[in-house]
Every structure is written in C-alpha cells, then in structure tokens.
Image: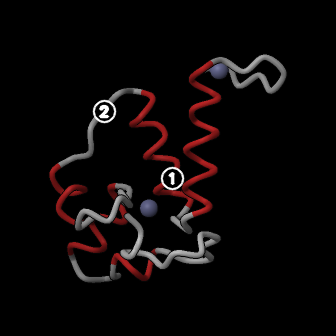
Amino acid sequence: MCHNSKTMCNDCRWARKLQFYGNYFGYPKCCINQFVKMALAEKTPTRLQRKVCEKTGFVPCSYCSWKILTKKVMLDELVQSRKCKIPFRKHK
Ligand SMILES: [Zn+2]
Ligand SMILES: [Zn+2]
C-alpha cells in the first residue's frame, strides 16, 4: 500500500472501498480495519470468525469474535450507526 491520496494504488482504492462499506453497514472500526488488512493479505477468515458471523456478511475482528464467543456481546449489538436502510440480517 502506498497511502498516497493523490496517486492511490489498487490496494489503497480497494481498502478505501471496503472501509466505506464497513461504515455504511455500521460495523465497528476494529472489525473493519482487520477485515481490510486480511483482504489485502488475501487471508480468509478464521474458523472462529466464520462461526460467529452467522453468514450475515459481517466478519468481526478476532477480539470481537472472542467477545461474541464468550457471550460478552451479541453479534447484532456490534452493528451500530448503520447508514444502510436495510436492517442487519435482512441484507442479502
Ligand atoms: Zn497504495
Ligand atoms: Zn472488532
């Protein structure tokens, strides 16, 4: 990644797009950032992440996944200030 706003490389452009949609869908910053990093490194979500996301399309970061697993937080509680008009889980 170049992080140069004037001549953005494809990775930066993609990262910005993923960040935009993460915010749009109301996902937490920590989860968006980790998701972007993993996507750029072409890493797939871990078993824990796949387990807790319940096929909603929202992939929580390792820390949030752990909180969900230990029932400190619910998956739905993490989705806040959503800009998308379609409610979480209803979105396909
Ligand atoms: Zn770049
Ligand atoms: Zn998180």
Ligand 1 resides in the quarter of the picture at top right
Question: Which amino acid type corresponds to the residue marked 1 in the rendered image?
Answer: Ile
Question: Which amino acid type corresponds to the residue marked 2 in the rendered image?
Answer: Lys
Q: Which residue is drawn at 32% across and 65% down?
A: 56
Q: Quadrant of residue 18?
A: top right
Give the residue furthest to the right: 6
Estimate how packed mark 2 is, as few (under 14), some (14 to 19) or many (20 or more) residues with alpha carbons within 10 Å: few
Q: Residue 77: x, y in percent?
A: 43, 82
Q: Would you place residue 65 above or below residue 33 in this image?
A: below
Q: Tell me: 5 left or right of 37.
A: right
Residue under label 1, please give it.
32
Q: Would you place residue 51 above or below residue 45 in this image?
A: below
Q: Residue at x 84, y 21 (%)?
A: 6
Q: Residue at x 43, y 75 (%)?
A: 88
Q: Residue 14: x, y in percent?
A: 57, 32
Q: Look at the numbered disc 2 and say if its residue's Cβ is closer than 8 Å to ligand 2.
A: no
Cα separation between marks 1 and 2: 14 Å
Query: Could you tell me which secondary element the residue under label 2 belongs to?
Result: loop
In the picture, the disc for residue 41 is none
Q: Tell me: 42 left or right of 22.
A: left
The mark that comes first in sequence, 1 or 2, is 1
Q: Residue 71: x, y in percent?
A: 25, 82
Residue under label 2, please give it.
43
Q: Tell me: 90 left or right of 7.
A: left
* Front residue of this view, candidates 90 and 13: 90
Q: Which residue is drawn at 55% across and 77% down?
A: 80
Estimate how packed mark 1 is, as few (under 14), some (14 to 19) or many (20 or more) residues with alpha carbons within 10 Å: many
* Front residue of this view, candidates 17 and 77: 17
Quarter placement of the N terminus: top right
Q: Residue 81: x, y in percent?
A: 62, 77
